[in-house]
Amino acid sequence: MNLDAGIALGSALGVILGVVGALLVKWQIDKKSVTSAGARSEEILRSAKAEAQIARKAAELTARDQALKLREKVEAELTEKRSELRGVESKLDRKEDALERQNSEQKRKAKALAEQADLLDRRTKKVASREEEAEQLVLDRTAKLHTIAELTKEDAREMVLFEAREDAEAEAMSLLARRLDQAKETADDRSRDIILTAIQRIAADHSSESTVSVVALPSDDMKGRIIGREGRNIRAFEKATGVDVIVDDTPGVVVVSAFDPVRRETARRSLEKLIIDGRIHPTRIEEVVLETQKEMEDIIRKAGEEAMQEVDLRGIHPKIVQLLGRLKFRTSYGQNVLKHVIECAHLAGMIAAELGLNVKTAKRCAMLHDIGKAVNHEVEGGHVVIAADIARRLGESPEVVNAIEAHHEDVKPETAYAVITQAVDAMSAARPGARRETLERYIQRMERLEQVATAFDGVKNAYAIQAGREVRVIVHPHQVSDPKAMKICREIAKAVEEQLTYPGEVKVTVLRETRVVEYAR
């Protein structure tokens, strides 16, 4: 029994161990299956993520492409709209211009109709007034006849004498008017003779260079000494004098160039002194230039004093004398300005003597009319304004100041001396030989100035006067209004600035005038 129990127990244990082993084997199999499934799931997840990223990028590219296409379409539509808007704006501008022209034309026609109506009204009133005068004259004559019929012999004689006296006075007035006209014609002939006589008595011929001076050298070796080591001498000289020194292949000379004639003359004299001295270095250059500048002040003062003595004038302010001396180194169209004012003073004295005026005052006006040219590059404004201001500040008389201001017709002449100054300035500048400009070139410049002015719409005629210093433009009064006349004046001035070359300034004057003529019959 014990044996059987042991066998049974052993069998049971074997069965239990078998079951436990089977369970262990199954557990190992299940564990491997789970691990394999996890790996596959991770791989699937990675693959899904990669595909999702690719899909997202593809979607982004597609969206960008669509956005670009949409943007191009929108920009094309905007461009088309802008083009349409520009076309509409252009049409509106054209319509606005057409309406403005129509409005101007209507205003012009309305103004013309109003003028015609006003003229007709005045004529109607004049006719009515003359009818009333005629009726009154008939009544007066009738009354006189009635009166004469009842007058005595003495009363009748007195009345006849009174009427004869009135007729004689009327004839005397008519004769006086004719005599005045004849006197004006005689005065024109007389003034012409005076001017011709004055010109014949003053026949100087003077023109000079205006921008360069030539300095002769003893030898070409001197060019190297003027330039100096690495150009230090020539740089020091140009800095001290304010001029340009031109050293080229021309044998035996160097050229000093400057717009300011006083600086140019100072540089020329300084360079000649340095060449004679032989010591050319920066320190010596500064010493010589300072010394020459002081000498130039004395030269300028002496030139002014000699000019005063030549025209026999006294009591001129020293500053004005200094300015006159500076004119010795100024030119206008090649004409030396100091010689020009001296010539003007002589001419003015001769004309004043012929007319019985004060010779000293006439010479003074002519002598000082261009002193502004001595400083007009240092002070803002034209030489006329500058000269008048200087003369006024330094105590010159009102006659002299007005003559200076009026010699280019900037203001109205108030005295005979101003008119004489205008005349002698034109005589000295315009006579043959005074200025270097040839007749052909002068005529071309005048014609070109007139052509520029007549090229504008509404311009009737244009005249260049005062040797090209002024152009006077006459416009059609019915085509050009006052505002348009001002606009044309500005446009002509701008065109002259852009298209022409001229010294100084050109004054543009636009004249718009409506004349009404009526004859009394």
Image: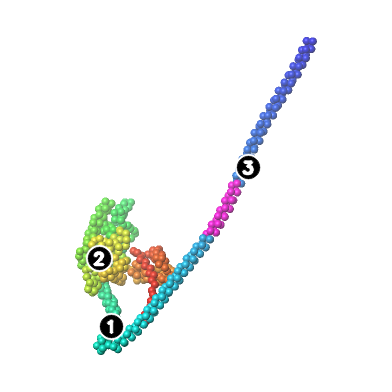
Label of residue 166 in the image: 1
Q: Is residue 234 above or below residue 53?
A: below
The tag earlier along the polypeptide, 3 or 2, is 3
Q: Residues within 10 Å of mark 2 (few under 14, many from 20)?
A: some
Q: Position of residue 205 (x, y in %)?
A: 28, 70
* Secondary element at tag 3: helix
Which amino acid type corresponds to the residue marked 1 in the rendered image?
Glu
Residue drawn 23% across the image and 56% down it? 294
Q: CA distance from mark 3 to mark 2?
A: 100 Å
Which amino acid type corresponds to the residue marked 3 in the rendered image?
Ala
Which amino acid type corresponds to the residue marked 2 in the rendered image?
Pro
Q: CA distance from mark 1 to mark 3?
A: 125 Å
Q: Is residue 445 visible?
A: no
Residue picked out by circle 2: 398
Residue drawn 52% across the image and 63% down it? 91
The tag earlier along the polypeptide, 1 or 3, is 3
Q: Position of residue 370 (x, y in %)?
A: 28, 65
The tag earlier along the polypeptide, 2 or 1, is 1
Q: Is residue 287 visible?
A: yes
* Secondary element at tag 2: helix
Query: Which region shows up in magenta?
Result: 63-86
Q: Quadrant of residue 409?
A: bottom left
Q: Is residue 329 above or below residue 163?
A: above
Q: Is residue 148 above or below residue 124?
A: below
Residue picked out by circle 3: 55
